Image (spheres, rainbow, N blue to C red):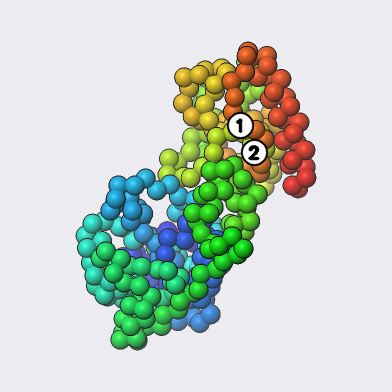
Amino acid sequence: MIPLCAPENAKLPTALALGSFDGLHLGHKKVIKAILKEPIGIPTVVSFWPHPREVLFGESRLRLDLPNEKLSLLEPLGIEQLVLVPFNKNLASKSAETFVNEILVKTLQAKHISVGENFRFGRNREGDVSTLKKIGACLGIKVSITPIIEDNDGRLSSSRIRKALKEGDLKHAKYLLNRPYSFTGTVEKGRGLGKTIGWPTANLKIDGRKFLPSLGVYAAWASIANGQERFSAVMNMGPQPTIDPNSLSAVEVHLLDKEINLLGKELNIEPVQRIRLQKKFENIEALSEQISLDAILAKEILTSNL
């Protein structure tokens, strides 16, 4: 696995692609591929952590791809390291030129910088691609600008991926990502309520910074971290309105036709299709009957997605 490192620990000199690259869609990949055409530095992706809007405006910014998840997506592209620049108010106060000189040139020894055409940087977002080209020309650094990619619905963006996930539309999210959406969680001990009605579930603890799909019941693939086999599953995303109306939102996964002790293991979950929204049933028996129907439908969906 490629390393995730701070700027001062990066391998030098670099050819770097700069941006948030959240969701790592086709537009991001084009920005990244620009630095791979000529071997004039260590192929590097540079992003900020936390997101600038969290620091500047106090917004909560959940990520489509957490840094550790991004490593396995970048390595096949030919990237050799992911550098996270700590974003704080001191960095935000630097002029565009100072940012390039101090971070990209002095610390990362950039020989080639690649960005998307809508990239902005520096104090109050004063710098744009024209600014970057001028600075690069003065310093003898190659600068590549990648045009925005559009389809019939407009600009390919992380915002559109988030919208699809909010709507429970995993098919459209997969199209925009050009890969299946997934997340990882650690199985922790629950209250065992699912087992009492014949549907034992693995309760997942998930990094709170991860962007998750909307509430509902999903057909999903599940696999144990570092394992080769994947299992068909039904996933509930949300509270338990029938069993415990006061329960907090949770992610529960039931493996279909498979009994494995998953406690303490990391599970990778790939939701494929939302089966239904959550609802409160009259009693436990009605809930159990509905889960049986959910399981049948989930099997059909997953079989057609093999």
Q: Amino acid at mark 1?
A: Leu
Report the disc number at residue 40: none
Residue 34 percent location from the top left of the image: 51, 76
> In this rendering, would 252 be left or right of 84?
right
Residue at 26% across / 61% down in the picture?
92
Q: Is residue 203 left or right of residue 49?
A: right
The residue closer to the viewer here, 201 or 209, is 209
The relative height of residue 305 versus residue 256 in the rendered view (above or below) is below
> Quadrant of the rendered structure where residue 259 is?
top right
Query: Could you tell me which residue is drawn at 51 percent across and 69 percent down?
Result: 148
- Residue 75 lies left or right of residue 139; in this view the side is right
The correct choice, above or below, for 132 with respect to 71 in the image is below
Q: Is residue 301 above or below residue 115?
A: above
Residue denoted by label 2: 274
Secondary element type, mark 1: loop
Quadrant of the rendered image containing residue 44: bottom left
Residue 269 location, x and y as percent? 60, 42
As measured in the structure, the alpha-carbon distance from the residue carrying label 1 to the one carrying label 2 is: 8 Å
Mark 2: few, some, or many residues within 10 Å (few <14, many ≥20)? Answer: many
Which residue is nearer to you in this view: 289 or 70? 289
Q: Is residue 188 visible?
A: no
> Would residue 126 be seen by someone viewing this image from the given angle?
yes
Residue 36: image location, x then y, percent = 52, 76
Residue that carries the numbered disc 1 in the rendered image: 277
143 up-or-down from 267: above or below: below
Whether residues under marks 1 and 2 lie with C-beta atoms below 8 angstroms apart, the answer is yes
Report the side of 175 relative to 54 (left or right): right
Q: Position of residue 73 (x, y in %)?
A: 55, 59
Q: Secondary structure at mark 2?
A: strand
